[in-house]
Amino acid sequence: MMRKYDDEFKRQTLKKVFDGQSVAAISRQIGVNESLIHKWKRDALKNGMNGVTGSEVQEMAALKKRLRELESVDRKS
């Protein structure tokens, strides 16, 4: 039987993804199949989430990724 996840659960899960945690680690942590998390991510990037458009979600994810990269380089210096 397929379990129904509420929007808040999905939002919290995707926040972890967009904050840089791996989908595999999140999947193990919360007990949700990786493919379902990837689907939620695709949907959020395409359609938006919580009043934020898909393009804004994409831009925020890209900016967070770039920030992590820069922080990683800075730590190595």
Image (tube, rainbow, N blue to C red):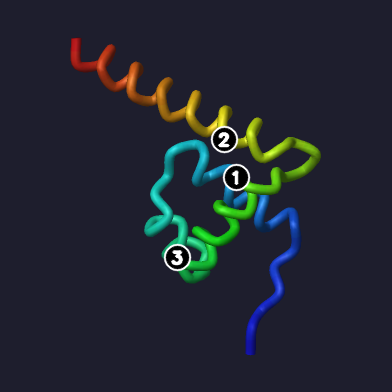
Q: Is residue 46 left or right of residue 17?
A: right
Check contact, mark 1 vs mark 3: CB within 8 A. Answer: no
The reply to whether callout 2 and callout 1 are in contact (CB within 8 Å) is: yes
Q: Which mark is residue 34?
A: 3
Cα distance between the residues tagged 2 and 3: 20 Å
Mark closest to the chain's N terminus, 2 or 3: 3
Q: Is residue 61 above or below residue 77?
A: below
Q: Residues within 10 Å of mark 2 (few under 14, many from 20)?
A: some
39 left or right of 2 in image? left
Going by the numbered disc 1, the residue's amino acid type is Leu
Residue at the left extreme, as displayed: 77
> Residue 31: x percent and y percent?
50, 70
Residue 17 point in image, percent of width and height: 50, 46
Residue that label 2 marks: 58
Q: Which mark is residue 45?
A: 1
How far apart are labels 1 and 3 at the CA level? 16 Å
Closest to the observer, 42 or 67: 42
Q: Earlier in the sequence, mark 2 or mark 1?
A: 1
Tell me residue 68's x, y (percent).
Answer: 39, 25
Q: Residues within 10 Å of mark 3 (few under 14, many from 20)?
A: some
Location of residue 72 by image quarter: top left
